[in-house]
Image (tube, helix red, strand yellow):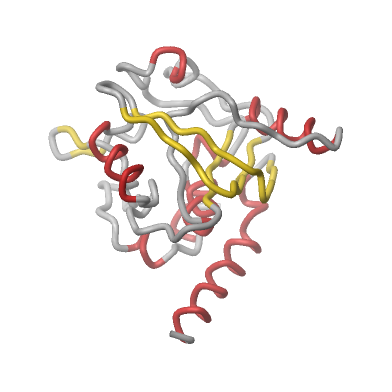
Amino acid sequence: MRFEQVPMPDEVGERPRDDRGYPVPAITPWQDGQPQFALTDHGRSADCALERRCSVCGGFMPRGPVWRVVGPAESAAIAEALAAGRPYRNLAPTMEGPGHRACMLYASMVCPYLARPNARRRVTADGAGGGLTAAAVRGAARGGTGAVVGFGDYEYAVTETRVLFRFLDLVEFRPHESADEHLPELRAELARGSASDQGR
């Protein structure tokens, strides 16, 4: 599915766009007037963590669950824990911040790397990520099953070089081979949001 066919949350629609028309996430740095999609801007990510803002649209996230898109390793670990009836504990920190449910469903479908298991990264995420960005190299394929995952809350640490997140209390697990599978749920989530806005 082409990205312009994916229903867009209103807040995402207010983001700046690149030359192709892709909305640029709130944590994405710019260089020479171009967004650097494979990278995370330290200051922008820190602001989102400190102010409880969505890493995709930059809007405020009320207290309560937050969502993120995970790759195959974490998706498999969550599925294994659920199948065994064990609670899933996200002990390893990640540099990927949380967001609204609609924004993460949208991001999972629009980002080519997140959307399809055979997609490959076009650029390398150089920088101070250390082992946390080891998979973010040019040509690396996502592979496996990804997922949009909801957590009851998150905690974070801001260091001089990185912003690290850890997620607590699994509340939703939506695995996908191809993220197009989330289209009905994204539409339903956007409809729920519109109904909530009208009730205010």
Q: Hey, which residue is sitting farthest left in the picture?
A: 32
User: What residue is rendered at 66% in x and 32% in y?
Assistant: 89
Rendered residue at 64%/62% (across/down)? 185
The correct choice, above or below, for 115 with respect to 60 in the image is above
Residue 125 percent coordinates (x, y): 36, 22
98 sits left or right of 88 in the view = left
In the rendered image, the quadrant that contains the C terminus is bottom left
The residue lying at 51 percent from left, 33 percent from top is: 166
**Identity of the residue furthest to the right in this view:** 84
Q: Nearer the viewer, residue 143 or 103?
A: 103
Image spot of residue 47 (x, y percent)? 27, 43
**Residue 95 horizontal/vertical position (percent):** 42, 29
5 lies above or below 151: below
Q: Quadrant of residue 88?
A: top right
Position in image of residue 132 (x %, y %): 46, 19
Instruction: Please state which of residues 179 and 49 is positioned toward the viewer in this rendering.
Output: 49
The answer to whether 102 appears left or right of 176 in the picture is left
Image-based side of 120 in relation to 48, left or right: right
Q: Nearer the viewer, residue 109 or 10?
A: 10
Q: Residue at x 21, y 38 (%)?
A: 34
